[in-house]
Amino acid sequence: MADLITKAEYKAYAGISSTNHDAEIDALIPKISQLVKNYCGTGFTDYYSDAKSEEFNGGFQSLILKESPLVQILSVEYSSDFGQNWTELTEYVDWYVDQAMNSVVSTAPSGFPKTPRGFKVTYFAGYESVPVDLKLAVMDLVKYYSRNDGAVHSNRAPTGTGIQIEYITHTQFPAHIKRVLDLYKVDYT
């Protein structure tokens, strides 16, 4: 869906005025945007104005929504025929929103009954615009991948008689970037 930064934003941040690196920047921004969305478990701006629908099997007191922060619930629906026909449930009668837990909660003491494909929630969630600290982390990642060419580099020169292989010993983001991304990482525990 939407990229987290634009080429113009990155070029202003990196102090680039030429068009020499435009193709590389154009290739990196969507890939890094998707990487950050996957790592954090949210689309950030993707569902702020485009509704998202999720189906649930029930069996719990709450239906935890994947996207956050929650902006508005459009509908909560029930189906007794595996999602073939839907009946809209009523807010404050059948369910209510727990904003802190980013979930829809059943008003029934027993919760939402266990029903395969029995519940559907349609909602808006996310940010109207990408938070500035997150943009900074994405721009730092573009710079990181651009400088490192996405490859593993060695400090030692290969000899004429052998091949040198360097293995990556960890899969972490650089620490200053990871600190920011972890602020936005969705935690379902």
Image: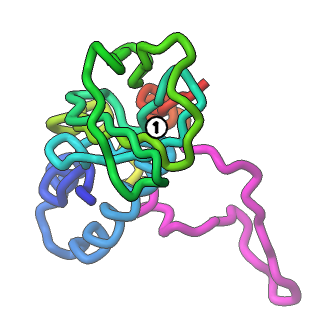
Where residue 149 appears, as percent x and y from the top left, is 48, 69
User: Is residue 58 in the magenta section?
Assistant: no
**Residue found farthest to the bottom:** 161
Q: Quadrant of the N terminus?
A: bottom left
In the image: residue 189, left or right of residue 50: right
In the image: residue 78, left or right of residue 186: left
Q: Relative to 131, is 24 above or below?
A: below
Q: In the rendered structure, which amino acid carries the disc numbered 1?
A: Ile
User: Dot 1 lies on which element?
Assistant: helix
**Residue found farthest to the right:** 161
Q: Is residue 90 visible?
A: yes
Q: Nearer the viewer, residue 171 or 156?
A: 171
Q: Quadrant of the C terminus?
A: top right
Where residue 125 appears, as percent x and y from the top left, is 26, 35
Q: Mark 1, residues whose alpha carbon is within 10 Å: few (<14), some, or many (≥20)?
A: some
Please tell me in which quadrant of the rendered image residue 92 appears. Answer: top left
Q: Relative to 39, is 27 above or below?
A: below
Which residue: 31% across, 27% down?
A: 69
Where residue 98 appears, as percent x and y from the top left, is 37, 15
Where residue 169 appears, as percent x and y from the top left, is 76, 52
Dot 1 corresponds to which residue?
177
Please tell me in which quadrant of the rendered image residue 78 appears. Answer: top left
Q: Relative to 23, is 29 above or below?
A: above
Q: Is residue 135 visible?
A: no
Which residue: 51% across, 45% down?
A: 39
Q: Nearer the viewer, residue 89 or 41?
A: 89
Which residue: 35% across, 66% down?
A: 28
- Residue interval drawn in magenta: 145-173
